[in-house]
Image: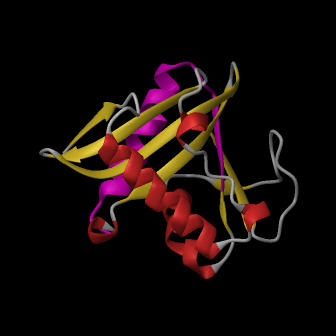
Amino acid sequence: MKIVIDDLSGPEIAEFLSEHMREMRSTSPPESVHALDLDGLRKPEVTFWTALDGDTLVGCGAIKRLDPDHAEVKSMRTKPIRKRSGVASLLLEHIIAEARRMGFTRLSLETGSTDFFLPARKLYEKFGFDYCEPFADYRPDPHSAFMTRAL
């Protein structure tokens, strides 16, 4: 498997992210969906990666610069058929290493608080993320869990 920077111009990643948005909207109230759409991911402060197994898209993830020292993990998704196969761990390992390389000293994230998101929260815990208060522009939300870790 390889992880590459993606310019978000291909139809396959557009559909993959569209599925992500549909899934997030089906599991959380609209005001609690904080996933970025394609335009949001194309901002200069965002670096976006895809994970490929051969030529097959199996996952994606991004970081968004919040300030010179702090970035946010965004758009972590694994192709449903590949869940629990190590794709998310490889992506998160890559994102953490790249965030360090870019000079960030802290990574934070927002994910869901319901049982649907339990595997994601367990993954982040495994990689050293601890629960925290809302950061950046987030506000307390019973449907959100906020996590952070020092790099």
Q: Residue at x 45, y 37 (%)?
A: 95
Q: Residue at x 56, y 19 (%)?
A: 103
Q: Is residue 144 above or below residue 109?
A: below
Q: Residue at x 37, y 32 (%)?
A: 9
- Observer-nearest of 127 and 119: 119
The image quarter containing residue 3 is: top left
Q: The C terminus is located in which quarter?
A: top right
Residue 7 spot, x, y in % from top left: 39, 27
Residue 151 visible = no
Q: Is residue 130 above or below residue 38?
A: below
Position of 148 with respect to 96 (left or right) is right
Position of 13 with respect to 114 (left or right) is left
Residue 77 spot, x, y in % from top left: 44, 56
The image quarter containing residue 25 is: bottom right
Q: Residue at x 38, y 55 (%)?
A: 88
Residue segment shown in magenta: 84-110
Position of 112 with respect to 78 (left or right) is right
The outermost residue toward the left is 54
